[in-house]
Image (cartoon, rainbow, N blue to C red):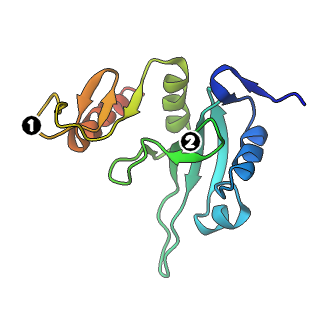
Amino acid sequence: MKTNTIEGGAFLTLDELKRANIRAGAHWFDESTLHYFDGQIHSLYGGRFVVHSSQFHGSLDSAPRQYHIAYATADGKVESLPGEKTVTLDFASQEGAESFARLLEAGRLRIEKFQYDKHRQCRSCLTFASWILNGDILCHQHFGVELEAWRERL
């Protein structure tokens, strides 16, 4: 049976990613999950970066729709990008999220997470780092500042 993946385990289509997500036992694309977050799946970039949106509805009012970028692992699981709730890639428009996803797809922007390491400190302070953004080792606080700078360029 032929699989529709390209080198590195990236996915060619959202449908293929959805099938892999089900095989992995995950529920990221389930109708109930999307309904709970009022979620919508918009597009796939580079076979790994998923642009999606969500909207919070309270008892009195609703928040504006937020657009996000998630990362698909080789086994089909989907994770928030960068993966920590303290710093997420949120955008006010679908166009902003897709522009940023194109930078990730083209390799112009690289985001990596690594485990806390006493030998790696943030380039801007003495805090132990946990992120690498285009080669710069950053803590959560400075990672967010750097992401904002990138987002303003879009």
- Residue 140's tag is none
Circle 2 residue:
94
Residue drawn where x is 47% and y is 64% of the image = 63
Q: Nearer the viewer, residue 35 or 13?
A: 13
Residue at 71% x, 60% y is: 30
Q: Is residue 58 left or right of residue 88?
A: right
Q: Nearer the viewer, mark 1 or mark 2?
A: 1
| Quadrant where the N terminus is found in the figure | top right
Q: Disc 1 or 2, which lies upstream in sequence?
A: 2
In the picture, measured across the screen, residue 144 lies left or right of residue 67, that is left
Find numbered disc 1 in the image and state the secondary structure of the residue it sits on. loop
Q: Amino acid at mark 1?
A: Leu
Q: Dot 2: few (<14), some (14–19), or many (≥20) neighbours within 10 Å?
A: some
Q: Amino acid at mark 2?
A: Gln
Q: Position of residue 151 (x, y in %)?
A: 38, 33
Task: Find disc 1 in the rendering and name its residue.
Answer: 126
Q: Quadrant of the C terminus?
A: top left
Count the marks: how many? 2
Q: CA distance from mark 1 to mark 2?
A: 36 Å
Q: Nearer the viewer, residue 93 or 109?
A: 109
